[in-house]
Image (spheres, grey):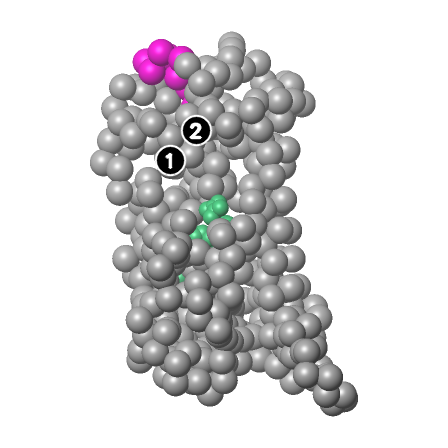
């Protein structure tokens, strides 16, 4: 039987995804009618980006699952019309990209790379570079992305602490969880990396109180989501020198408005939500594998818990 698979995303995404999705269906031996236009009542699966025009899922009476093209699901979990399973994106290409981005920015801070790159004063001041095992890095979030980045940093020798909602055991990472765990983790965080989802429970994870728990002169790297940080509290901590520098990839409002203080703050690096991008080939394989599972009666992978919001 041919499956009707609706691609509900912005048209430019279709150009990127059409060929890789067709190739992944062929490779899996699943006949699929893949299109941006299919009558709602005959759609079997929906490949979805939350910024698509599709916001009312009620007419999709036959659909078995929504497969999100993004890792973040905060723009869809509150959709009351969505009653069928929702899977978030876990893509090996996206994960690799995030690991590289996080590692690069951790190394920038760890090695003090700016000192040499920005130097124009002709002073010749040799110093002994630190070693990774002298540096404590904290991963806030130990999911698909936080765990992979944490493991890579641990592999380089960093002292890695991880924090998650539920207890975990990850070789090479000292895993903490819950409210007490957060306090302990932040007290160690010479460098904190935020890879939490945006949910009611994670908003303002870094606020005036929790920022004050971090060692003086700490660094913050946020490729997670903007609302994880109380911006006013971070700006105050930067101005007071309690936080030395922050690299921020995600913001409450994107694009970051041109008059936002982050743009011109000397202790902030802004990147335009580019930490990691879903890669069409590997992401298509993940989506088709989930559809294969649905058809085989196997549980879907990477399902979102709508109550938890991620
Ligand atoms: P996962 O859902 O796999 O992992 C989320 C992690 O956060 C889990 O370890 C989870 O804990 C933890 N967590 C959730 N709620 C809490 C809480 N209340 N307290 C403590 N820990 C909590 O997500 P991913 O790793 O795939 O992605 C993380 C985020 O990265 C995405 O939601 C998205 O916002 C962002 N992202 C950003 C990109 C960019 O380019 N900037 C690209 C892709 C993603 P537990 O393990 O116990 O469930
Ligand atoms: C995502 C992102 O959620 O790009 O996939 O931020």
Q: Identify which residue is drawn at 32% across, 68% down.
A: 230
Q: Picture coordinates of residue 96 (x, y %)? A: 64, 51
Q: In the image shown, does 166 or 279 lie closer to the viewer?
A: 279
Neighbour tally class for label 1: few under 14, some 14-19, many 20 plus, Cα within 10 Å:
few
Looking at the picture, tell me which residue is in the foreground, 49 or 114: 114
* Secondary structure found at label 2: loop
Residue 112, placed above or below residue 231: below
Q: Earlier in the sequence, mark 1 or mark 2?
A: 2
Residue 45 appears in the rendering = yes
Counting from the top left corner in percent of width and height, residue 19 is at 62, 22
45, above or below 212, in the image: above
Name the mark on residue 212. Answer: none
Please name whichever residue, 153 or 255, is drawn nearer the observer in this view of the structure: 255
Q: Is residue 205 visible?
A: no
Side of 114 relative to 81 (left or right) = right
Q: Going by the image, does 117 lie left or right of 276?
A: right
Query: Where, by quadrant of the figure, is residue 15 drawn?
Result: top right
Assess whether mark 2 and mark 1 are in contact (beta carbons under 8 angstroms).
Answer: yes
Q: Quarter for ligand 1?
A: bottom left
- Residue drawn at x 60%, y 70% is 106
Stretch in magenta: 38-46
Q: Mark 2 points at which residue?
A: 9
Looking at the rendered structure, the secondary structure element under dot 1 is loop
Is residue 43 on the magenta stretch? yes
- On the image, numbered disc 1 is attached to which residue? 51
Assess whether residue 80 is covered by the magenta stretch: no
């Amino acid at each position: 039987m041919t499956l009707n698979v609706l691609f509900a995303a912005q048209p430019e995404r279709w150009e990127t995804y059409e060929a890789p999705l067709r190739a992944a269906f062929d490779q899996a031996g699943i006949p699929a009618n893949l299109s941006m236009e299919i009558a709602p009542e005959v759609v079997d699966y929906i490949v979805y980006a939350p910024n698509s025009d599709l916001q009312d899922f009620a007419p999709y009476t036959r659909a078995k699952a929504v497969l999100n093209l993004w890792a973040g699901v905060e723009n869809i979990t509150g959709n009351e019309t969505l009653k069928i399973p929702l899977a978030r994106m876990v893509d090996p290409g996206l994960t690799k990209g995030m690991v590289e981005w996080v590692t690069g920015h951790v190394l920038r801070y760890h090695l003090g790379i700016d000192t040499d790159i920005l130097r124009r004063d002709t002073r010749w001041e040799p110093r002994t570079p630190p070693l990774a095992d002298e540096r404590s890095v904290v991963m806030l979030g130990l999911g698909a992305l936080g765990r992979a980045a944490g493991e890579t940093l641990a592999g380089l020798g960093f002292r890695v602490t991880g924090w998650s909602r539920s207890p975990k055991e990850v070789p090479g990472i000292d895993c903490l969880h819950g409210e007490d765990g957060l306090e302990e983790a932040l007290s160690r965080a010479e460098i904190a990396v935020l890879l939490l989802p945006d949910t009611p429970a994670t908003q303002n994870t870094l606020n005036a109180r929790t920022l004050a728990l971090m060692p003086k002169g700490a660094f913050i790297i946020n490729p997670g989501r903007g609302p994880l940080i109380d911006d006013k509290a971070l700006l105050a901590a930067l101005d007071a020198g309690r936080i030395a520098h922050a690299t921020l990839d995600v913001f409450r409002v994107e694009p970051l408005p041109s008059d936002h203080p982050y743009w011109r703050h000397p202790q902030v690096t802004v990147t335009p939500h580019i930490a990691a991008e879903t890669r069409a080939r590997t992401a298509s394989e993940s989506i088709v594998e989930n559809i294969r599972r649905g058809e085989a009666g196997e549980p879907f992978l990477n399902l979102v818990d709508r109550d938890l919001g991620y």
